[in-house]
Structure formats: structure tokens, C-alpha cells
Image (tube, grey):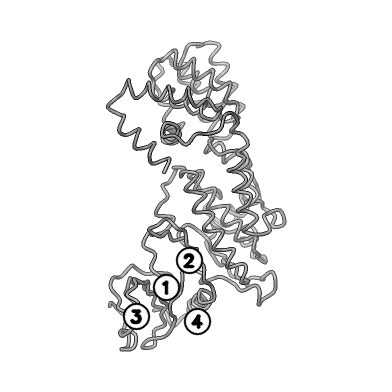
Amino acid sequence: MERISVDGDFRNRFEPLESLGAGAVGLVYRGRDHATGRTVAIKFLTRTGDPSLLLRFVQEGRILARLRHPNLVQVIEMDVSASVPYLVTEFVAGGTLRGRMTPDVCMNQTQVLDYIYGILDGIAECHAHGIIHRDLKPENILISEEGVAKVADLGIAKDYARSGPVLTQSVALVGTPRYMSPEQLRLEPVAISSDLYAVGLILYELLAGEHYLHGNTLPDLLRNSQQLDKNRLQRRSPLVSDSLARAVHWALEPSMGRRPASATDLIQALKASVATPGRQTGSPRRSSAWLGIAIVAIVLLATAQALRPWVENRHARICLERGQALLESGDRTGAEALARGALTRHPTDAQLLLFHGLTLSVADRFAEAEIEFREALRQAPGHQEIRVHLIRALVILGKDVEAEGLIRLALHESPEDSQQWVQLGVRSTT
């Protein structure tokens, strides 16, 4: 075992098998517990000369030892071997939540909420024992092979039950800035709601495929954390319902007092948002493979791809480029006005019709968007990208039968793609 010397007592109990890499405080190994035969994770503190790291290491072990919950990584033993402190925990084979995320790709909402419910259940257990995590981020969420989210790395967690209801931090910035609450960035006291803000950041990133807080410096992050843009999430991911967006924004309130009072409150708000999605009105959603195919296809075909320059008219192309820039900057009204004006000059341009429909979709005006998508498809029959956006509008409006008919038509016209579409549909409904 590289650079680690352990005594016989340790080897009688545990067998290090494979190095998993270097962590913040030392080396991490996959190992075996001889007493139980279980695979375990063994963390060795190699930087023993740093008192602050030693304190963090010991604190993580003590905190985890007090907690027993399926959504928290379980500690098995903490001790010292040959002057090297070590911590043995359960081994979570599925990797981190970060490893399951793809930049600029929105994760399936059902999967997102499954992960978030687990994270919230785990930190609710921490909070019930007076523990604030303070460093929640995708890298500190482990996913089991069964898909269960487990909160890990409580090295900088604080026991507010012993320090008072709200812990005053030291002058040092502790945690990962991009996942910090505004009060943490200001080096102010933290509370339960500080962890809930971090969960809101993770939730936003999973749904939108991007970080909520932009900026590369602490002043930029702090400034951006003071502003709550309640339209940005649905601009990035139009399939997010109004009620789900409200629950996300509740967690992301800049003011601590305006956030949920507990993890349980946020769980209830998220579950209520699924039960009453708000913007998605119409007939009840049917969990059919056809509907799953439609939704997954919509997610995969991003707006940017739909705006590929297949328009021959130079003026129309210029309008599209300007409109896309306006839409990306958040000026939906300007983009819509530009598209509407361009259509007076090019009323049969399928790409302009598609773009106008997209600007209407961003504003939740799906009935109007449906009209534009239909006309675009009439001008460019069989065009897959237009068809996908029309299907999306139909699904949101509750016109499932018609959406299924369009998908069947697409499969009939392009049988070579049928297996891929079916696989996507099955994946989305499991």
C-alpha cells in the first residue's frame, strides 16, 4: 500500500485492495472488512502535520458515527494505525452525482427528484441531530448501484446544537464557493437554510444543465447570488412546470428567512409540484412509451440545434441570428418581435415560423406556438426538428393522441431510426 504503513491490528481487521485516489486529507482505498466480508472505503489522513485537517478528519468520523440513515454514508470505524489516522466507511460503488451529470444536458426530471429527495432526507437527519453540512455539492453526493443518493464528506460540517441555533463562522471561507449560500459567501452565520440553498443549486443544475451561480471570482458569485431570476430555469428547460420552478426558486431565495424552514418543507413543496404541475394543463399524462419517446426526443434536440442555418434567404438568416442572440441573452420579447416582423416579409419561411414558435413556447404560449409549428411543418413536410417541437407543444397541451400519431408517422417515414426512438422511450419511462 503506497506510502501508508499500518500495524498488524489494522491488517487483521481490514485489507486495502485498490487505491481510489487522493482526497482532500489523504489517500482513499477500496478495501475489505475481514469481520463481515463487506467492501469498504478506507480513508487515511497522510497530512498529519496540519492541525486543521486533522480536526476535519476526526470531526467527519465523529459526526458520521452519530448518524444512521440510508441517505448518509455510514461510518464503520475510526482509529489510528502506526500513527496514521484512518476512517472506514461503507463503499458506495455507483460513483458521485457529478459523474452522472453531463454539461449543458438537462437530466430526466423523475431521476432528478429521486436524487434530491434522497439528499434532502439525508440532510434532514443531519439537521435533526444539530448538524449543518456546509459543503453540499454533486461531488459530495454518492450514488449507490441501486440509484440511492447518499450524502458524504462531512469534514467541515458544524454542530449547531452545541454551538447555538446559528453558528458564526470564522473569518476563513469554508466550502466550495460555487455551491455556497449568500450568507456563506459573506462570511456570515449559517443555518439549516444554508444547506437548503445548496440543495437548490444542485437541483437547478440538474434540471437546467448549467450552474445557477455564474462567475469566476467571489465578488461575482456573491453579486449573482443576490439576484433571483425566476424565468431563467424555464428558459433553459421549458418542460419544467411553474410549480416545480417555484419550489426551486424558494430554495434559492437570497434571504435566509424566505427559504424553506426545513428539508421536509422543501420535500413537500417538490412533491406537491409533481402532483399539481401548474403550467401543464389538459388531459392527464399517460405513462406510455409513445409519450416517453416524445419527451426524450424533445430534450435531446436542443433549441440551438433547431436553429441550424438551412434558410437560403440572407435576410431571414440574419433575422434568425439576431433573434437567437436576443433569446440567449434573455430578451424573449425582443426575439419574438423580431421574428414576427421578419415573418411579414417571409411568411412561408419554415425556419422563421419555427423560431417564432420557440419564442412563444418560452413564454408558455403553447397554443399559439402549436399554430406556428404546424405551419412550419406544412412548409417543410417531414422535417424532424419541427416535428419534435410540435410534438412537445401537443404533449404539454394534453393532446397526447395527436402527439402519438405524429410519432407513429415519423417512425413509419424513417424506420431506420425506430429502434433508437423506442430505446429512448423505454429509458424515459423506467
Name which of mark 3 and mark 2 comes first in the sequence: 3
Residue 384 drawn at (x, y percent)? 39, 24
Foreground mark, 4 or 2, reads 2
Marks 1 and 2 close (CB-CB < 8 Å) = yes
Marks 3 and 2 close (CB-CB < 8 Å) = no
Marks 3 and 1 close (CB-CB < 8 Å) = no
Q: Quadrant of the C terminus?
A: top left
**Number of callouts:** 4
Above or below, 83 relative to 396: below
Label number found at residue 244 = none
Foreground mark, 3 or 4, reads 3
Q: Amino acid at mark 4?
A: Pro
Residue topped by disc 2: 152
Residue 63 drawn at (x, y percent)? 54, 75
Q: Which image quarter: residue 260?
A: bottom right
Q: Quadrant of the N terminus?
A: bottom left
Name which of mark 3 and mark 1 comes first in the sequence: 3
Q: How much space separates mark 1 and mark 2, taking CA atoms?
A: 10 Å
Residue topped by disc 4: 51
